[in-house]
Amino acid sequence: MNAMLDQLDLGRRDLNADLHAHSLFSDGLLSPRAVMERARERGVELMALTDHDELAGLSEARAAAAALELPFVAGVEISVSWENDQTLHIVGLGIDPDYAVLDVGLAHLRSGRDARAHRIADELAKVGIHGAYEGALRHVSNPSLVSRSHFARYIVESGHAPDTKAVFDRWLAKDKPGYVSHEWVALQTAIDWIHGAGGVAVLAHPKRYRITHHQLHRLYAEFRERGGEAIEVLSGSHGPDEVQALAQHAREYGFLASRGSDFHGPLESRVDLGGLPALPAGLTPVWSRFI
Ligand code: AMP
Ligand code: MN
Ligand code: MN
Ligand code: MN
């Protein structure tokens, strides 16, 4: 998969792996190269780039990681619609970015984002936030990937809120005035794309979904049944108090355990690259599969 991986002991539970991070190719604030440099500086031993619905940053990331002698796996974070309008994020790790079915499928998935962005802007205008489509686009680097994060940055910049978290809480989270529902891909499709590309399918930040305990367990069972292999036990999108429960879920369902900061940028992310604790005991790390 990558020459540098030979030099790692992939059985180590305490490996400083960071397997979830974003660049300018989706809603991150740094270039893929800058993400790899920062990861290196911060002591990351195994790094992935996982932009939303997009593979275009992976070649720059891979080249930068190789130059830094930073072990690297190619990744992606795919937007999925599950049950009644619930969005899920499925991370694929160790994928081949040249697998055409994935590449073409993601291009199609991204193509719905522009119309969605217009609808978000229309809803925001109704609650007094004007010019949001153009404003969000000023924060976008990859024209095919306008996301709610770009809207959030525009809304902060225009003085309506102190930070992006406040924007989501008031306008952009589900059931808030600027939220619009959107049809992403089916869970099975995302898993099949990842497997077709030779990768491992990981349920991202399981505790971030606003679903009941019962639904979460139904999701685990369905994800496993459909071929999903891993869950993020450690995520920058979770609080530290949720780790033990997630570790228990991984053991209970036989999932491999992943670890990723979900880093978007230096001032925006609660956890910086490589900043999470080690995986709890009694888990098989997802990186044990990166042979
Ligand atoms: P989208 O794919 O356009 O729906 O945007 C989703 C992105 O918005 C996520 O990947 C996060 O980066 C960001 N996001 C979602 N919810 C929140 C939140 N509550 N606070 C901060 N950022 C969030
Ligand atoms: Mn994001
Ligand atoms: Mn996510
Ligand atoms: Mn993410």
Image (cartoon, rainbow, N blue to C red):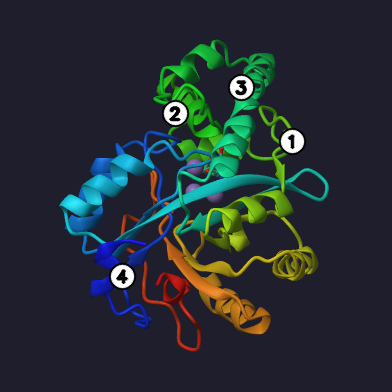
Pair 3/1: label in front = 1
Disc 1 residue type (three-letter): Glu
Pair 2/3: label in front = 3
| Nearest to N terminus: mark 4 or mark 1 | 4
- Cα separation, mark 4 vs mark 1, equals 35 Å
Disc 4 residue type (three-letter): Asn
Labels 1 and 2 touching (C-beta < 8 A): no
- Cα separation, mark 4 vs mark 2, equals 30 Å
| Nearest to N terminus: mark 1 or mark 2 | 2
Question: At 62% across and 50% down in the image, what residue appears?
Answer: 193
Which residue is under mark 2? 153
Of helix, strand and loop, which one carries label 3? helix
Q: Is 165 placed left or right of 113 in the picture?
A: left
Q: Residues within 10 Å of mark 4 (few under 14, many from 20)?
A: many
Of helix, strand and loop, which one carries label 4? loop
| Camera-side residue of 248 and 256 | 256
Q: Is mark 2 within 8 Å of ligand 1?
A: no
The answer to which image quadrant residue 132 occupies is: top right
Spot occupied by residue 125 in the image (x, y as percentages of width and height):
64, 14
On residue 117, the disc is 3
| Nearest to N terminus: mark 4 or mark 2 | 4
Spot occupied by residue 93 in the image (x, y as percentages of width and height):
48, 58
Pair 1/2: label in front = 1
Image quarter in which the C terminus is found: bottom left
- Cα separation, mark 3 vs mark 4, equals 36 Å
Disc 3 residue type (three-letter): Ala
On residue 16, the disc is 4
Q: Is 246 placed left or right of 268 in the picture?
A: right
- Cα separation, mark 2 vs mark 3, equals 14 Å
The answer to which image quadrant residue 290 occupies is: bottom left
- Cα separation, mark 1 vs mark 2, equals 24 Å
